[in-house]
Image (cartoon, rainbow, N blue to C red):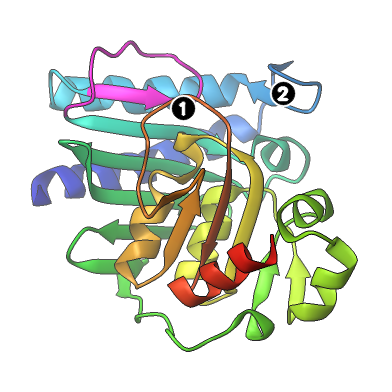
Amino acid sequence: MQSKLVFAKQLVYEAGDYVREHMKEELNIDTKSARNDFVTNVDKGTEKFLADRINAKYPNQNFITEEKMVASTGLDNLWIIDPIDGTSNFIFEKRNFAISVGYYEDQKPVFGIVYDVSRDEMYVGVNGDGAYLNDRKLPMLSQTITLMDSVVYSDTKTLDLMCGDAVKAHDEFMSVRYMGAASLEICGVAAGRHQVYLSRRLKVWDIAAATIILEAVGGAFTYDTCDNKIIFEDKNFEFMCASNPTVIQELKDRR
């Protein structure tokens, strides 16, 4: 596993270089399921770059990827890739987006890598060996913090849907912010930069790497009634994560 992790970290750094180089060029932008669901030539190119290099190094791998640029036949030796998480941010801000790569064996998490390209920050989580930010080990998260002490990353529509009343929720949290890149918002919880992230519409490639990082420091997550477990399906789901299971329960009790 260690050699595969070392390979994957270097590969993601190189994918970051690929993204930075192509950011300088005019983007080809299309939409997918909605008018604000964007995909660019850089999303597709980055995904192909990652998958081609993985397949060249390790034959007989499987993939779940956002842009479907590579075929897969099963769930063994599984790489779950979001080539650019936060494509809208990538297009309009050129920041607050990430490359996300999660690796699973026997449907169990092995390691996750989330690379904030614009900040040159790489989060790495290894099952059984903690989480790291640019090779600095992250401390375990507080298990005593409460919802009232929490900075929450979410949007108003999600707060209305998942917390009952967005205006009231604002009063019951420490603060509310929003970024628009799920993997980075989950990693922000893991790094202690905030304590809660909520979304009403995610897919598995948004969370597969970041939740490994989060769990490695004692964080908790849940979606579609599945606590701290990834389901390998291409479907939308509501998602919540927090510094500890107590805050997750407080969020559930609000609904």
- How many C-alpha atoms fall within 10 Å of the one at disc 1: few (<14), some, or many (≥20)? many
Residue drawn at x 84%, y 79% as measured from the top left: 171
Disc 2 is placed on an element classified as: loop
Q: Position of residue 81 (x, y in %)?
A: 40, 33
Q: Does the magenta-highlighted stretch encompass residue 55?
A: no
Specify the quadrant of the image occupied by residue 24.
top right
Q: Does the magenta-highlighted stretch encompass residue 73?
A: yes
- How many C-alpha atoms fall within 10 Å of the one at disc 2: few (<14), some, or many (≥20)? few
Single out the residue that lies furthest toward the bottom. 144
Residue drawn at x 58%, y 58% as measured from the top left: 185
Specify the quadrant of the image occupied by residue 11.
top left
Specify the quadrant of the image occupied by residue 17.
top left
**Residue 173 vertical placement versus 14 (above, below):** below
Read off the residue under disc 1: 46
Quadrant containing the C terminus is: bottom right
Q: Position of residue 220 (x, y in %)?
A: 42, 64
Read off the residue under disc 2: 26
Tell which circle, 1 or 2, labels the residue nearer the N-terminal end: 2
Disc 1 is placed on an element classified as: helix
Left or right? Give the position of 100 relative to 57. Answer: right
Left or right? Give the position of 9 relative to 13. Answer: left
Q: Position of residue 182 (x, y in %)?
A: 58, 49
Residue nearer the viewer, 107 or 11: 107
Residue nearer the viewer, 202 or 194: 202
